[in-house]
Amino acid sequence: MTRSFGFITSLIGTLLLALTVLGSTELAAQSISPQIVERLKTLPESQRNALLKQYGIDPSSLPGINNTALPERTLGAPGQPLERLNDETEQSFAFLESQPSEEPVEEVAPEDKRFGLDLFRSDQSQFSLTDDSPVPDDYIIGIGDELQIYLLGKESATYTLPVERDGQIVVPGLIAVPIAGLRYEDARRFLIEQIESSKIGVNVSVTLARLRAVSVYVAGEVERPGTYSVSALTSATQLLFQVGGVSDIGSLRNIQINRSGKKIATLDLYDLLLRGDASSDVRLQSGDVVFIPPYTKEIKLYGAVKRPARYELIEGETLSDLIAMAGGVSADAYLRKISLVRSDPELGRTVTELSLSEASPVLRDGDEIQVREQTTELSNGIEVDGAVVRPGYYGWTQGLRVSDLLGNLERDYLKVADLNYAMIVRTVNRLRDIRVLPFKPIDAIASPGSEADPELRPQDRVLVFRLPAVEFELQSEGLDTELELLSLSEAELRKRGKEKAGHEAEQRIGDRTLLLEPVIEKLRDQASPETPVSIASISGAVRVPGEYPLVANSDIADLIAAAGGLRDQAYLDAAELRRLRVEAGGGLSFNYESIDLRSPQELNGKLLSSRDHLTVRAIPDWNPTATVTISGEVRFPGAYRLERGERLADLIRRAGGFADNAFPEGAMLTRESVALNERDRARDLAVTIRQSVAASLLTEEVQGVSLAEISELTNELTNFEGQGRLLIDLPAAMGGDALANVRLLDGDELIIPQNLSNVTVVGEVKRQGTHSFQEGFDINDYLGLSAGLTARADADGLYVVRANGSVEVLEQSLWRFTKRNIDLRPGDTIVVPVNSRYKESLVAWREITQIIYQGAVSIAAVVAL
């Protein structure tokens, strides 16, 4: 708001400077543009009036601004909001500065704010002194006060009488009574005694009706210095509220009150702010001067203290006093090392470490004090994480074991916890290198206190993993691991009916991977040429492939247990172990060994070394849950589990053969992989169309192309999911044709329709429709039943779609309607495409006429030469 007002002030000032000098206010008002008037409307009325009066413009002379006349300034009555007595232009800007700004305020860190300064800000403090506040007994009556006197009894009357300039109050029927300079309570008693002694039978009550106004001065580092008319009850603190408080460099602890040329009091606002002590606050009298000098010493305190800020210190205050001003330190403060940053004229900025237990140096203006926090690590803590009921930190005691923390299966472990593999991550030296100690939670529960129940040390971390996912069965499409299955798209998972299971499996694998990730990274970081990295890896037909920590005497069985165990499709006869060796010349060599996973000697006797990798092969074409569905005209439709290598004819026989009204020629086989391929091809076509159209538009090869139509077409192609129909010849397959007898895959669906006895004609014929199949009819006959071809028909492009989806194209013939070389069958569809070169005769004749006309004009031009 202040910026907006300043802009308008500058604009109007530049425009009207000459006009206001001439005194032509009407001309000045007429010279203000409508844009400036609109900007003026956005200002509050008081700001707008002040600005216009500054340039001598009557608000009512501006169109659209209907303000009341500007009031004349008078001395503020006691109890009313304070009013500046300075020049009006200065007051306008001071008033505007007190208004909340509409500009976004940049956030300031707490330690960069001066403590106590916000107390007096007008947008936070709404203090205003009212005239109905109680008057204290020690209030000194002075000239300008008004008293209200009530007479009751023999004579009843009410008088509101001022204290005259001579200090007396004149009561009707009495002599003048001098009361100026008396305390309010003394003056009240004195008046009552005087009136009651002179008027027998009258009861008297005296109150203060209106307080006098006093004129005071505010100088120094305040927001709005100047002369103010204030109530006689106003104290120095209340005055600071009214003038907007001290400035950014003003002192809050050395506010001086001067009276008759002498300093009568010094106000320290920290007494009020920190201790609630207002005893040093002084009630102001007429002619008093409140002076705020700049501060002399300000210290920035931040870090682990309750109220970080910039604090003003006075002579004799120490670091302990500073921290007390901030409310003390936080519970996690580290007091043995407190940093003091100081600017030195010769050395620049320096830092010194202080301690509260030692004598600290004298603080200087501009010093910065930082109190640091304690470390978040627990020196004697044990962290438990993973698939447990109550993860977190536990206190260590001598002899503490795993079973002391996780000793009850139902109470301490989640139901999804892997009880065959867990680990302890232990810090082993000052470099914080780690060592991994695997254990079996089920053994620790069963044999507490034994070697199976490891003893814990301070700062150990116990990791309990979730069970690996067991819901998935691998597909027969080359997916060897669960992670590969999880990498499939959402649509593919949905088609496999595995969406929910896929999400759960991903969560469980992620849990183990998440816990192990920092452990693996730390093992890599602490490796060196003398101590190779303690990591081995595993892939293939295990539940959670990946990298795992390698411990002393780890064997293949330990690595398989870390990976969650083998999958049921694992091929046990020949796993592959790859070992990496560094040659003497610095090269690498790889050694591959075949491992028999059925052999205990291989599993438990083959010790692993750094970077060993075990590949567990899967049984080829493993898919025990592969299913195919057959529906329609068979004796026993339904879902059948596939045997390895099963084909179409095998499935028909398992389904009991065809029903009586089956139509094998129209059998339809749908396959998910075909649908996915169709979807991908459609999306590729959409991309090709977009690129082709964009290139044509850039080179101006085509014009008048509707981008909306192109976009609609490409969107349809992008959203196309594919039909997945695989063309088959079921009668040939049943007849023993090996090529036609297609091998079935998981998810295939075979549909056998009912017997058909019709032929359909579509496309550019005069009447599309379906006709009964007639033995001996050819294409011409069915075209005749459809009333013949239209003018747009491409007679040379006729083709027939068979009931099984295959397409046969007619051979070219000199006699278009007499020779058709396709034998029609029930269920066939004759398609007559449109001739892309066709044009209506009117359009064609218009183009021919245009060509003739242009040729004639050219000939005439040549003859004229």
Image: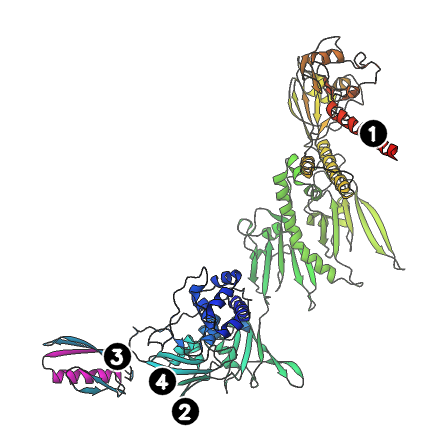
Q: Are marks 2 and 4 in contact (CB under 8 Å)?
A: no
Is 154 in front, or is 116? 154
Give the colouring mode of the picture: rainbow
Q: Are marks 3 and 1 in contact (CB under 8 Å)?
A: no
Specify the amino acid type for callout 4. Ser
- List the single residue furthest toward the right: 585
Query: Quarter of the image holding residue 299?
Result: bottom right
**Between discs 1 and 4, the one toward the N terminus:** 4
**Between discs 2 and 1, the one toward the N terminus:** 2
Q: Is residue 206 part of the magenta span, yes or no?
A: yes
Which range of residues does the magenta coloring cover?
A: 183-210
| Alpha carbons under labels 3 and 2: distance apart | 29 Å
Element class at badge 2: loop
Q: Which residue is mark 4?
A: 286
| Alpha carbons under labels 3 and 1: distance apart | 116 Å
**Between discs 2 and 4, the one toward the N terminus:** 2
Q: Which residue is mark 2?
A: 261
| Alpha carbons under labels 2 and 4: distance apart | 13 Å
| Alpha carbons under labels 2 and 1: distance apart | 115 Å
- Residue 500: image location, x then y, percent: 61, 40
Q: Is residue 732 visible?
A: yes
Residue depth check, mark 2 versus mark 1: number of the one nearer the observer: 1
Q: Which residue is mark 1?
A: 856
Q: Is residue 491 above or below residue 558?
A: above
Query: Quarter of the image holding residue 857?
Result: top right
**Left or right: 124, with 794 as reference point:** left
